[in-house]
Image (spheres, coloured by chain):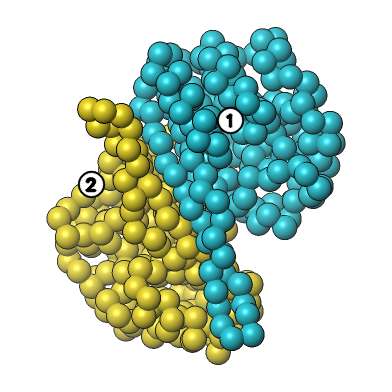
Chain colours: A cyan, B yellow
Amino acid sequence: MWNFKTPGIPDEEFERAEKVPITKEEVRVVQISKARLKPGQIVYDIGCGSGSISVEAALQIEPSGKVLAIDYDKNAIELTKKNMIKFDLSNISVIHGNAKEKILDLEKADTIFIGGTGGDTKEIVELSENKLKSGGRIVIGIILIETLYSVLQVLEKLQFESVDITQITISKSRKTSKGTMMLARNPVTIISATKI
Amino acid sequence: MWNFKTPGIPDEEFERAEKVPITKEEVRVVQISKARLKPGQIVYDIGCGSGSISVEAALQIEPSGKVLAIDYDKNAIELTKKNMIKFDLSNISVIHGNAKEKILDLEKADTIFIGGTGGDTKEIVELSENKLKSGGRIVIGIILIETLYSVLQVLEKLQFESVDITQITISKSRKTSKGTMMLARNPVTIISATKI
């Protein structure tokens, strides 16, 4: 359960599993904010991993909205289900399979989050153009330089406007015996845009 | 007006004035998330500047809650009032003066944001200990190394737990004639903690 209205559930509140990635708290909060959510919306979470974005989105869109969480990794699907139960949510539908095939059958979305997508990010952005409602938002979390380049190239050719590229680098403190040091995390780039 | 449930109003939506600072969108979103807001809460925004944190907090705590926004700069006070009107909010009380004196008379808070406080941050953190309800949150945005050091020193002596130190560095893209470059912003450190 998360009893607050604001997003930003601490990472340690989620169920975790080895090798299933989680979008960390601060980056997750920025991604959720770029999506501009409101109650009743339909949200895809493509490459849902541990389901942390699905959970935060589900809380924001309330029971009148629905999150469709997709992953090709069975462990991710199981973990997302566990987190859905842990946070007492019933508005997440979990879909196991290849996002490129699975999203073709889904109802149109107000927001599409794209995360770890095993090299298919460009193709999924292309498919997302047709699945987003006009005025809908796409939010893509990117680690690899090659993915960043290919998404930028393809976004220019599609029906998107207000493209925002934000790179975030987070450091967190650690107490040592001699004082407080900052430990750096890897930079993440978030691309967000509005469907025309 | 902001018609979304999620925080993260784009910077350009706010009224601005020369020499009055604004907490930029992505850093603001992380600060709001660290506060863990819910409807009905009492929030101080100390060193409110342009009022961007006051506006986002006021939206999250809804009309049943109240933001008390304090600044010693008259231009900041005027600007916060303008933004309160622009976003159609009536649950922000704007207080002009020295926060060290002004907060003594205020009702107890669920959350205290501390921003640009002209060298008084340490003293304001000390005073905040008594003004926060048990379980309340303090969220401090810090630019200066000296402030970071002094706040860390003082927090250890006060009744706070779950101290989190997060440094955020944001870069934003800019289109040039030859391609897309990333422009770096200065790092901001956010300290948050819970009153015991």
Tell me what residue is drawn at x 47 percent, y 48 percent: A168
Q: Circle 2 sits in a helix, a strand or a loop, which is it?
A: loop
Tell me what residue is drawn at x 58 percent, y 17 percent: A123
Q: Position of residue B14 (x, y in %)?
A: 28, 45
- Are labels 1 and 2 on one chain? no
Q: Which mark is residue B31?
A: none
Left or right: residue B12 versus residue A71 is left
Q: Which mark is residue A113?
A: 1
Q: Circle 1 sits in a helix, a strand or a loop, which is it?
A: strand
State the image quarter where residue A47 is shown.
top right
Tell me what residue is drawn at x 60 percent, y 52 percent: A25
State the image quarter where residue B115 is shown.
bottom left
Chain for numbered disc 2: B
Classed neighbour count for the residue bearing mark 1: other residues with Cα under 10 Å, few (<14), some (14–19), many (≥20): many
B178 up-or-down from B21: above or below? above
Q: Amino acid at mark 2?
A: Glu
Tell which of A188 and A95 is nearer to you.
Answer: A188
Chain for numbered disc 1: A
Q: CA distance from mark 1 to mark 2?
A: 30 Å
Tell which of B160 and A119 is nearer to you.
Answer: A119
- Extreme residue in the bottom direction: B157
Q: Please state which of the two labelled residues, at mark 1 or mark 2, is closer to the viewer.
A: 1
Q: Amino acid at mark 1?
A: Phe
Tell me what residue is drawn at x 42 percent, y 76 percent: B148
Quadrant in which the C terminus of chain B appears: bottom right
Tell which of B177 and A36 is nearer to you.
Answer: B177
Residue that badge 2 annotates: B15
Classed neighbour count for the residue bearing mark 2: other residues with Cα under 10 Å, few (<14), some (14–19), many (≥20): some
Q: Is residue B189 visible?
A: yes
A99 up-or-down from A35: above or below? above
A15 up-or-down from A140: above or below? below
Q: Is residue A135 visible?
A: no
